[in-house]
Image (tube, rainbow, N blue to C red):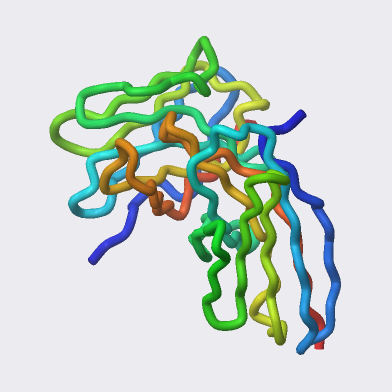
Amino acid sequence: RKEVEQDPGPFNVPEGATVAFNCTYSNSASQSFFWYRQDCRKEPKLLMSVYSSGNEDGRFTAQLNRASQYISLLIRDSKLSDSATYLCVGFYNTDKLIFGTGTRLQVFP
Amino acid sequence: NAGVMQNPRHLVRRRGQEARLRCSPMKGHSHVYWYRQLPEEGLKFMVYLQKENIIDESGMPKERFSAEFPKEGPSILRIQQVVRGDSAAYFCASSLMTSGLVNIQYFGAGTRLSVL
């Protein structure tokens, strides 16, 4: 079983839609989680950290449920520029990031 | 305020040649990480280095791969006698500090290695 698992998608949504991605992790010793965004043939870029209390950054909301070992990302009012692959990432005290394989989002006009 | 710099961006090698990938961390960062991304797959951790020290190389293949981060100069990922299966994007990341604090890693643009 992979340490971080995501639905690969693709999710095809119209502009203005709300879309949610989910991610599960297997190692309960994980310390922190992040969502990174990766555009085609580019490097991953940090989108936001994920906290148990939930955190919001503009149109993006992230949530961590430690009891269920589940992480979510909600994108409201989708824009064409949101089209990318969204990577769920765990950080353990070994200092390395553990990446999910990513969920592809395609926003169409 | 330069970010993580990797070069070359693209590298073509024939089977059996050596590949050298370079990474200069962000200014002030002393922790460097290398990740590999095979086509249609997620990023996989390879190695974590601090200046002159390899901290964790649990993701490095046992043969042909080595990494260093000298006191002066960039970090180098070296692949000897490349094979077609080494074709991938190699990303370097750097961070400011670890040891219990949240580790925000910033990535370079990557080196795309193609082995003919």
Image position, residue B102 (x, y; %): 38, 48
Instruction: Residue at 39% x, 52% y: name it.
Output: B104
Instruction: From this view, report whether residue A37 is shown above or below residue B101.
Output: below
Rendering coords of residue B44 (x, y %): 58, 35
- Extreme-top residue of the structure: B63
Q: Does A91 sit left or right of A73 as displayed?
A: left
Q: Quadrant of the C terminus of chain A?
A: bottom right
Q: Is residue A15 above or below residue A100?
A: below
Q: Residue A39: percent from the left, percent from the top? A: 61, 63
Q: B48 left or right of A42?
A: left
Residue A23 visible in the picture: yes
Q: Quadrant of residue B100?
A: top left
- Quadrant where the N terminus of chain A sits is top right
A94 to the left or right of B95 = right
| Residue A42 is at least partly visible in this image | no
Q: Residue at x 55, y 22 (%)?
A: B82
Q: Estimate the x, y position of residue A41 in percent, counting from the top left.
A: 61, 57
